[in-house]
Amino acid sequence: MCRRDEAGLFFAPSKEPTAARLSREEAAKRVCARCPVMVECREHALLQPEPYGVWGGLTAAERRVVLARRRRRDLELKKAARSSDRIAAAG
């Protein structure tokens, strides 16, 4: 769907005013919400990571937040695993 008529919704034109950007991003997210591959698109944009545009219903700023949360979660899981290993070794 985004590869067709709405492609211009997904990427900001140069020097786009804030109100126009927010409106365009919301319109792009509405297109994403109807997309059968939204989750796959989002994961692609997170794994690349894609620095611009709306992908999988998320803006670049929203993707940065998701990635930061994933990094924190992964660090916490690794830390917890190391603690469990130390406890098991001492036990």
Image: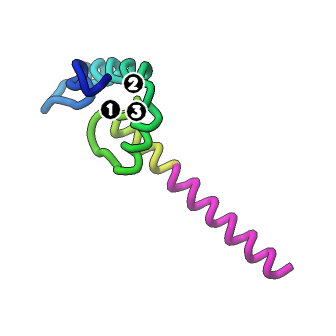
Counting from the top left corner in percent of width and height, residue 44 is at 39, 44
Write the residue at 25% across / 20% down: 6
The residue tagged 3 is 56
**Up-down: is 48 above or below 60?**
below
Q: Residues within 10 Å of mark 2 (few under 14, many from 20)?
A: many
In the rendered image, which residue does mark 2 sit on? 32
Mark 3 or mark 1, whichever is nearer to me: 3
Instruction: Please give the name of the residue rendered at 64% of the width and 66% of the height, measured from the top-left corner.
Output: 79
Q: Secondary structure at mark 2?
A: helix
Q: Residues within 10 Å of mark 1 (few under 14, many from 20)?
A: many
Horizontal side of residue 12 vs 67, given as left or right: left
- Determine whether label 3 and label 2 are within 8 Å by CB: yes
Residues under numbered marks 3 and 1 in contact, where contact means CB atoms less than 8 Å apart: no
The image shows residue 56, relative to residue 65, as above or below, that is above
Where's the N terminus, which quadrant?
top left
Q: Position of residue 20 (x, y in %)?
A: 23, 20
Secondary element at image label 3: loop
Name which residue lies at 58% across and 53% down.
73
Point out residue 75 in the picture as x, y percentages from the top left corner: 57, 61
Q: Give whichever of discs 1 and 2 has the lower sequence position.
A: 2
Give the mark nearer the N terminus: 3 vs 2: 2
Dot 1: element:
loop
- Residue where numbered disc 1 is placed: 54
Q: Quadrant of residue 2?
A: top left
Q: Which mark is residue 31?
A: none
Separation (CA) of disc 3 from disc 2: 6 Å
What segment carries the magenta color? 70-91
Q: Name the quadrant of the C terminus.
A: bottom right
Examine the image and state in which quarter residue 65 appears.
top left
Q: Is residue 20 above or below residue 39?
A: above
Q: Main secondary structure of the magenta part?
A: helix
Magenta stretch: residue 85 in it?
Answer: yes
